Image: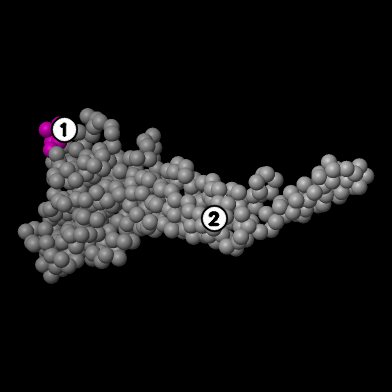
């Protein structure tokens, strides 16, 4: 409709200048007509032939990178038509979040008779997540700025930015519940033929584990204790509660994700069986396994997680821990350390579930209450790793600091 209106306007202008030349006569009148005719012909030809059979191609340095790395983008435009183009704007459509990374996704060219153009730009320090790079937009027009023509090449390129992985050559973690057994490479199992004792019933114990004779003798529920054959099976619990990060910056959650991803990468490289529990807007539990495909599932999930959960972190741990084999190691990654969490960890230790706590504090200083809680955990034999910065993670995991004297 707009093009039809433009053509109609030019026809009216040509008719008016022609009528004026006929009526007025003379060089000036006819010059106006011929000038209008030439400009109209040029404008119509530009509208018809500009960007005709133009193609574009997007080349990315990679579709999968880690947070903090740079994504290089090349847009190659080829114009098959012969019509000269005085100017052209090449623009690549980016998600709003990535526009903050680079302002060079739009460029003005003066191609003339040049048939090949290139737009190259970089997106440095890519943030974690999945991103869709959308359409490529080509805009050109005439030399007078009267005609504009736009061509959009539809495309969708998905780029996955995984969490930043900090190399961890050594992690000081030993499961004290292995009862002297050597860490095997198969899944931990309980030898149900060898009952080594009984203990008080704890919430989450299966019905088949209740020692009915001892329960009848004592008047309270008792649970069988079996001989354990333990491996370094690990289940990671990432705190995604929205309240846990409220008042803090997004960097604190990114630090938590980086910590979890780096530890999982280390455990996977050691052929440990790893799993992940991640309660957010959706509840995700990835069972323990030492398969590389399982690690890929975990890292794909960590690429998109957000602090959007409404579930209580402690309740999520309690809910999922019932499905773990006794003797597994639970790794808690959380920015919250309070009395309910200390009580939860004590309960897990009572059930002979080893716990390691990675306390994500970022740039803030530890409070006196933090030191008290850490002292209590140390007396329970629980390692507390205080994570302030991703660059310190390698040193942090070499061994926890003693806080018992501060409690």
Depth check: give the residue in front, 208 or 293.
293
Q: Which mark is residue 407?
A: 1
Q: Secondary structure at mark 2?
A: loop
**Residue at label 2?**
114
Residue at 38 percent across and 34 percent down: it is 247
Residue drawn 70% across the image and 45% down it? 146
Farthest residue in the front direction? Answer: 27
| Helix, strand or loop at mark 1 | loop
Q: Is residue 271 above or below residue 314?
A: below
Residue 63 seen in the current view? yes
Looking at this rendering, what residue extends furthest in the left direction? 180
- In the rendered view, does 78 fall on the left or right side of 265? right
Q: Quadrant of residue 241?
A: top left
Compared with residue 331, is residue 24 higher up or lower down, i.e. above or below? above
Q: In which quadrant will I find the C terminus?
A: top left
Q: Which residues are magenta?
A: 402-407
Position in image of residue 345 (x %, y %): 22, 46
Q: Nearer the viewer, residue 310 or 43?
A: 43
Q: Nearer the viewer, residue 50 or 356?
A: 50
């Amino acid at each position: 409709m707009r093009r039809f209106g433009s053509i109609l306007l030019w026809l009216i202008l040509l008719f008016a200048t022609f009528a004026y030349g006929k009526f007025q006569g003379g060089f000036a009148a006819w010059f106006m007509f011929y000038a209008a005719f030439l400009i109209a012909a040029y404008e119509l030809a530009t509208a018809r032939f500009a960007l005709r059979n133009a193609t574009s191609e997007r080349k990315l340095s990679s579709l999968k990178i880690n947070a903090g790395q740079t994504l290089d983008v090349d847009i190659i435009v080829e114009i098959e038509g012969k019509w000269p183009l005085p100017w052209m704007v090449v623009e690549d459509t980016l998600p709003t979040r990535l526009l903050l990374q680079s302002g060079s996704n739009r460029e003005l060219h003066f191609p003339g008779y040049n048939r090949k153009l290139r737009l190259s730009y970089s997106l440095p320090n890519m943030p974690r997540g999945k991103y869709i790079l959308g359409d490529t937009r080509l805009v050109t027009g005439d030399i007078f700025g009267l005609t504009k023509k736009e061509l959009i090449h539809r495309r969708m390129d998905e780029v996955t930015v995984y969490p930043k992985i900090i190399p961890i050559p050594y992690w000081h973690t030993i499961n004290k519940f292995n009862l002297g057994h050597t860490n095997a490479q198969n899944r931990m199992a309980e030898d149900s033929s060898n009952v080594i004792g009984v203990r008080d019933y704890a919430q989450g114990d299966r019905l088949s584990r209740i020692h009915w004779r001892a329960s009848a003798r004592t008047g309270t529920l008792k649970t069988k204790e079996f001989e354990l054959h333990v491996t370094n099976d690990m289940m990671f619990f990432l705190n995604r509660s929205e309240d846990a990060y409220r008042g803090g910056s997004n960097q604190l959650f990114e630090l938590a994700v980086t910590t979890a991803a780096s530890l999982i990468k280390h455990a996977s490289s050691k052929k440990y069986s790893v799993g992940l529990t991640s309660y957010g807007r959706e509840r995700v539990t990835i069972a323990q396994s030492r398969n590389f495909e399982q690690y890929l599932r975990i890292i794909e999930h960590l690429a998109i997680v957000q602090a959007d959960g409404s579930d209580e972190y402690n309740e999520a741990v309690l809910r999922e821990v019932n499905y773990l084999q006794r003797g597994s190691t639970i790794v808690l990654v959380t920015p919250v350390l309070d009395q309910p969490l200390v009580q939860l960890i004590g309960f897990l230790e009572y059930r002979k579930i080893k716990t390691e706590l990675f306390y994500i504090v970022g740039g803030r200083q530890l409070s006196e209450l933090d030191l008290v809680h850490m002292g209590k955990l140390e007396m329970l034999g629980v390692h507390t790793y205080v994570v302030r910065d991703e660059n310190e993670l390698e040193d942090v995991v070499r061994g926890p600091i003693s806080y018992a004297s501060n409690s």
